[in-house]
Image: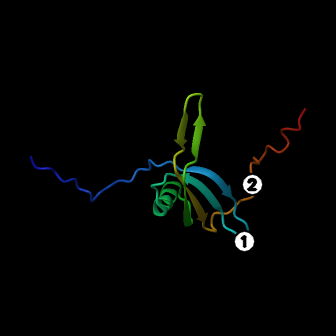
């Protein structure tokens, strides 16, 4: 029985890696917009950039990453001590292009300015 070789020439990349937004800062006159994501440790900088540009059409300039070790815990019971560890994770610090700027509108909805003062 001969093993068939899978054609790896055409692969479709589907995002199955979660990215959790931890913090975002707006662009100012001197600094561009930045965001911090919590990602899986196996994700690379290139994958983070491709994920944000191809799926969300965001102009990413730079991606920096930091690896974190999970917290080690000692749980003391009545009869024994149990050691546990939280999972490791990685943070991605993403810097966006200066095109992505704060519009200054915030959460104001046009036409709704005087709605909450009516009695």
Estimate how packed mark 2 is, as few (under 14), some (14 to 19) or many (20 or more) residues with alpha carbons within 10 Å: few
Quarter where residue 76 is shown: top right
Total count of labels: 2
* Callouts 2 and 1 close, C-beta under 8 Å: no
Quarter where residue 66 is shown: bottom right
Mark sitting on residue 105: 2
20 or 97: which is nearer to us? 20
Image point (58%, 42%), residue name: 73
Tell me which label, 2 or 1, sits earlier in the chain.
Answer: 1
Residue lying furthest left in this view? 1
Rendered location of residue 38, percent (x, y): 56, 52
Mark sitting on residue 61: none
Give the spatial CA distance, label 2 vs label 1: 20 Å
Say whether residue 16 is left or right of residue 104. Answer: left
Q: Is residue 17 above or below residue 49?
A: above
Q: Which quarter shows the C terminus? A: top right
Task: Determine the secondary structure under disc 2.
Answer: loop
Rendered location of residue 65, percent (x, y): 54, 62
Estimate how packed mark 1 is, as few (under 14), some (14 to 19) or many (20 or more) residues with alpha carbons within 10 Å: few
Rendered location of residue 41, percent (x, y): 48, 54
Task: Determine the secondary structure under disc 1.
Answer: loop
Mark sitting on residue 30: 1
Q: Is residue 69 above or below residue 59?
A: above
């Amino acid at each position: 029985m001969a093993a068939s070789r899978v054609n790896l020439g055409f692969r479709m990349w589907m995002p199955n890696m979660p990215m959790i937004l931890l913090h975002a800062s707006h662009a100012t006159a001197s600094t561009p917009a930045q965001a911090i994501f919590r990602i899986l440790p196996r994700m690379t900088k290139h994958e983070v950039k491709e994920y944000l540009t191809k799926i969300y059409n965001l102009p990413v300039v730079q991606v920096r990453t930091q690896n974190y070790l999970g917290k080690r815990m000692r749980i003391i019971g009545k009869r024994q001590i149990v050691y546990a560890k939280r999972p490791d994770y990685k943070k991605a610090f993403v810097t966006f292009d200066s095109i992505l700027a704060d519009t200054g509108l915030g959460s104001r909805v046009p036409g709704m300015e005087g709605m909450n003062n009516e009695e």
